[in-house]
Image (cartoon, helix red, strand yellow):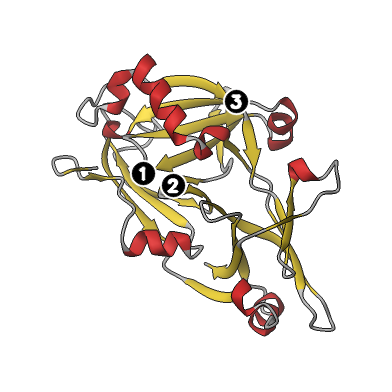
Amino acid sequence: MTNQTTELNIDISGDAMERVRSGYPLIAHLEPDHAIETFDERQPPYRTSIALPYVVRRGNAVWGFSGPSILSHSLGQGIYGLNAFGFTNIGPFYAILSYTSSMDALSQQTVAIRLIPIASLRKFSFQTAPQSTLVWHSKDRPDTAALGNAVDGGAMLSACVEIDDDVAMTARVAAAYCRLNGSGFELRTHLELFPAFALASDGLLTEITARNPDLMNASVRTARPFHLNDSVLSTFLCAASDGTFYSVADIPAARRQRYHQMTVRTTA
């Protein structure tokens, strides 16, 4: 969807989609319409970029999440909690997730979400991270030299785990453990949260259409935000070069699954 008047473009296709499939993180470029929506009312009109290092994809439906990097507060009054942004190509809206901590939301299995019309912004577009180098691909499983060199050089890493032909997740790597005998590695991604609807876009679109249809109309700039609570999933994965991984849900049962494909890249 592109709106030429206000320069809104949520499209991720062609080369951009191939880069997402290859494990590139996303960046959201935006300029709020100060008369309608602003992330900080104390600022004069501005533009900004928001890093989206956590990317969830089912088919060609993509969500990019910031993680809870924004401290919700009012100077002189107090701190309210953490906000995370989510931007998507499935419809003309974006998400703000609110919670006090990742562990609290994970234990409660729910998160509060506001869906806001993308038309409340003056400008919006996606970009894939410009500086990213592939250091490991599961098709070249025995060769871990480039990954080891990246770890030795202190590079920041991002892993894209393709769980099956249809579902993949990209997340920042918290730690990568390279075995000294060169036999392989294991990595663990950061634990951040995303709403379960990121993997069930059809159901979300059906609910919005039924309860707040204006939000699906890209030309309605003042559509009401759509408030909902959704169950949460975690970006945490422990994945190894032997083709196996486990998630938070697998920990109690000590269960490992097999991934379809994994890539590891350096990130800026």
Examine the rendering and report whether any part of residue 46 can be seen. Answer: no
User: What residue does disc 2 label?
Assistant: 62
Q: Are marks 2 and 1 in contact (CB under 8 Å)?
A: yes
Question: Where does the image place residue 234, in percent across and percent down from the top left?
Answer: 66, 42
Residue holding disc 1: 89
**Spatial distance from mark 2 to mark 3, Cα to Cα?**
29 Å
Q: Which of 52 and 24 is in front in this view?
A: 24
Q: In the image shown, does 125 or 135 lie closer to the viewer?
A: 135
Relative to 71, say whether 181 is above or below.
Answer: below
**Left or right of residue 8: residue 114:** right
Q: Tell me if 52 is positioned left or right of 244 in this view.
A: left
Q: Indicate whether 252 appears above or below 99.
A: below
Numbered circle sitting on residue 80: 3
Discs 2/3, front = 2
Q: Report whether 229 appears left or right of 86.
A: right
Q: What element carries label 3?
A: strand
Q: How crowded is mark 1: few (under 14 residues within 10 Å), some or many (20 or more)?
A: some
**Residue at the image position 61 percent from the left and 54 percent from the top:** 163
The amino acid sitting under disc 3 is Tyr
The mark nearer the N terminus, 1 or 3, is 3
Label 1 and label 3: CA atoms lie apart by 29 Å
Q: Count the marks.
A: 3
Dot 2 amino acid type: Val
